[in-house]
Image (cartoon, rainbow, N blue to C red):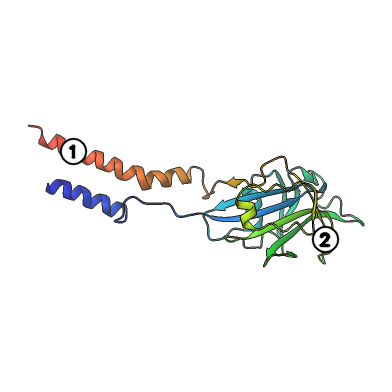
Amino acid sequence: MRRWGVVVAVILWLTGGALPLTAAEPHRAGLVIVHGDGRVVTRCVAFAEESISGVELLVRSGLELRLDATGVGTTICSIAGEGCPAPSSCFCQCQSSPCVYWSYWQLEEGAWRYSNLGAGLTQVRDGTVEGWVWGEGSASGEATAPPVLGMDEICGEPVDVGTGATTGDASLVQDPQPAATLVPVTTGGAGGAPMTMFLVTGAPLLLLLSLWWWARQRRKP
């Protein structure tokens, strides 16, 4: 009996004194992507960190991207195949007037705010909603904002935006993909999440089985 008391004490120590353990809920942020033809794509991105950058949010969305990283920041050249392909400049359609590029937005208190700050310098936290629009614009913020979609619409049930409906200046065309797609948590290294789950659930069980086998061997003559 004393031997099993030691086994239980070791397991409680390894698991922090509470069995079973439950994983913490991930943070989530929303993305609204508006293409030049008015098609709207949304993504719900989960992340384990307290905050990530706007660029990292795009990268973790699973959308095909072309980025140009320089000493002054990261430029978004193309999203999901729309924009400026390599090897052209990221502003291949902004050499004169009209200037067409991916404008960057943040949703604040139910309204979109044009961002003059690069996406590599912004902080995305739990509940943040960011938007990108391919269209005419200027650095002063004279551009078409995305449709207002909150976290409940992006990360909840898929949003059926219909065809030809309008919200503000953005014409919505139904995305052939599900409007809301939850992207798995990225922890910074391959296999990070499975290893964490093993340490939380598998390691204590393995230790228990090992001690049980050792106790049986000790009882043998």
- Toward the viewer: 64 or 154? 154
The residue carrying pointer 1 sits among few (fewer than 14), some (14 to 19) or many (20 or more) residues within 10 Å by Cα, namely few
User: Which of the two labelled residues, at mark 1 and mark 2, occupies the earlier sequence position?
Assistant: 2
User: Residue lying farthest left?
Assistant: 221
Q: Is residue 75 left or right of residue 17?
A: right
Q: Is residue 153 left or right of residue 12?
A: right
Please name the residue that numbered disc 1 is placed on: 214
For residue 143, which numbered disc appears in the image?
Answer: 2
- Toward the viewer: 3 or 166? 166
Q: In this rendering, which labeled residue sits more in front, label 1 or label 2? A: 2
- Toward the viewer: 123 or 74? 123
Residue type at the position of mark 2 = Ala
> Residue 167 placed where, x, y %?
78, 57
User: Residue lying farthest right?
Assistant: 97
Q: For the residue labelled by badge 1, is the local secondary structure a helix, a strand or a loop?
A: helix
User: Residue lying farthest top?
Assistant: 221
Q: For the point 72% across and 40% down, which residue is it?
A: 176
Q: Is residue 170 left or right of residue 47?
A: right
Q: For the point 82% across and 64% down, which residue is it?
A: 139
Residue type at the position of mark 1 = Trp
Q: For the point 34% across and 50% down, which residue is it?
A: 20
